[in-house]
Amino acid sequence: MLFILFSTIVVIPVLIGWGKFFEIITKTQLLKGISGKIIFGIFGISMIWTVSAFFVPLNIYVEASTILIGLLYFFKEKLYLELYRFSSKDYIFIGIGLLIILFCGSFYPYILDHFGYYVPSLLWLKDYGLVKGISNLDLVLGQMSIWHIFQAGFSNFTDPFLRINTVLLLVYLLYIIEKRSWIQLCFLPILLLFSQSPSPDLPVIIFSLITLQEILANNRKTAILFAFSVFVFAIKPTMIWLPILAFLYSIFIIKSPLKKLTAGIVIFVLFCVKNIWTFGYPVFPISIIDLGFSWKPSQELLDASSEFAILKTFDNQYSYQQIQQFSTFDYIKNWLLLDGIKSVINILFILSLLVFIIFTFIKKNKTITFICISLIIKSAFVLMFSAQYRFFIDVFFVIIFVMFLKYFNERKSLILSICLNLIVIGFMIFPSIAAQLIPSYRMSSMMGKFEFKQLYKPSSYTYKTYHSYEVGNLKFNVSKKYPFNFDTPVPAISESFVFDYQKAGVFPQMIDKKDLKKGFFTKKMSVKEQNKVKKITENITNSYK
């Protein structure tokens, strides 16, 4: 907890300073208040580092210069005085909330993507920046979320335990208190479950709710709101509903001229360029708009990824061949009636949408109508490509927020928040109880136990056991008896992808065998290389015996 607190004490003033700097140069505010400056700082730094990562690694020099500039503006503009604007009651809120957030953020990371996607992305960004064709090495690395770019820039010495999400939760608490948006206090306990990892799910949920709050409050700064909504989409494209909503709000309610959308369009272009550089196509993981770049992944691997997404849609309870034989009715029925908790989530998702549509018809409010349209479009995309609950979990937050905004006053929100906090904290301390109550929720079985050392140092895993191999001009590492490469030196390939490459008859190669930064492409294997990969996969298989 103490380590995260020290990180927070450094990061928050830096973000405030940068937020003020961006307000000066853009002559606008993203949001009012100290939380608004922090969020503007996150927005601006993320954009600067995304551009920088094309050319330089996000190393200690980038981090140190960013911190110095932020602190310079923090003290030069006397921004520390804004911290005194909170009332004594607010400070009590903040103090208690900070303790809860720090405590929950100090647990072991347990989200599987932390080990297979988040940390490997950060290792590459810190050492090399954005690498051309990195998806050829390990397909999931082609995502390179802007949130991981932001985390990577602070992970050299300010936040080495990767708890930037914990810091963001404190910022969210400040926003709730400043805006007196008490219903959002009820969301905070649920979001604590994302505090141990740099999961992009947390920022997109928080930022979307903040944007929604501003739109419902009739914020007329449409240029910055649209730009920020595209930024949220760039963090995680499943948030496509937010820029759609911001666009409809700008054009049909505020009636802003189209030129005010320019900044958002520029961010969208940057997002596409980043994806093309790392993945070969404009939007990961969809292989549409093929511009013929030589570093795009092989079609066999993309097809395998698509099959995997379909299997995950049905929680791996059916084979791909069985799913292919489903009629439309079977597809819907089997998705709704999966074994375990995911069936409940899927049914609640459909029911929530139906209830919200009815609510929209009753309200006859233009803004709520646009919110409903945006959510329907997003839901249609998710259901078409991969209807996994993690891709539509934000919809629940939005619907609850809009429908109960006027119902939850401070007292009701505080009571519910306390109850939910107790449940979540109990769940984190005793995950085995949840595993017994909800056996189908497999994540609870992966959560580490509470340790007293968390009170000063957040819990984290180390493994550093791996094999090294060479195929063609690529020397690479594979974790030993573990499917992910969260602390394996780069270049590392997840063992599942080695098997995929063997099946497809292709293997990643370096564009320049002397420089990893130059990137990777996929090459068809020779007979000699196929034999070498066969020995590697046999070695991986035998290591588990």
Image (cartoon, rainbow, N blue to C red):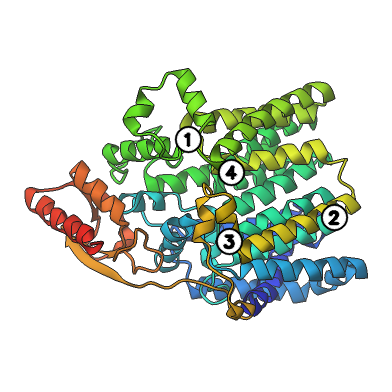
Q: Nearer the viewer, mark 1 or mark 2?
A: 2
Q: Which label is found at residue 386? A: 1
For the residue labelled by badge 2, is the local secondary structure a helix, a strand or a loop? helix
The kind of residue on which mark 2 rests is: Ile
- Look at 58% across and 58% down and name the residue there: 46
Alpha-carbon span between mark 4 and mark 3? 32 Å
Q: Residues within 10 Å of mark 3 (few under 14, many from 20)?
A: many
Alpha-carbon span between mark 4 and mark 2? 33 Å
- Determine contact: label 4, label 1, CB under 8 Å: no
Q: Residues within 10 Å of mark 1 (few under 14, many from 20)?
A: some
Q: Which label is found at residue 431? A: 3
- Please name whichever residue, 284 or 105, is drawn nearer the observer in this view of the structure: 105
Residue under pointer 4: 233
Which residue is farthest front?
A: 436
Q: Nearer the viewer, mark 4 or mark 2?
A: 2
Does residue 94 appear left or right of residue 238 in this picture?
A: right
The kind of residue on which mark 4 rests is: Phe
Of callouts 3 and 1, the N-terminal one? 1
Does residue 110 appear left or right of residue 373 in this picture?
A: left
Residue under pointer 2: 415
Of callouts 4 and 1, the N-terminal one? 4
Alpha-carbon span between mark 4 and mark 1? 17 Å
- Please name whichever residue, 271 or 424, is drawn nearer the observer in this view of the structure: 424
Tell me if residue 268 comes above or below residue 423 in the rendering.
Answer: above
Which residue is farthest left?
A: 528
Q: Nearer the viewer, mark 4 or mark 1?
A: 1
- Look at 27% across and 65% down and name the residue there: 477
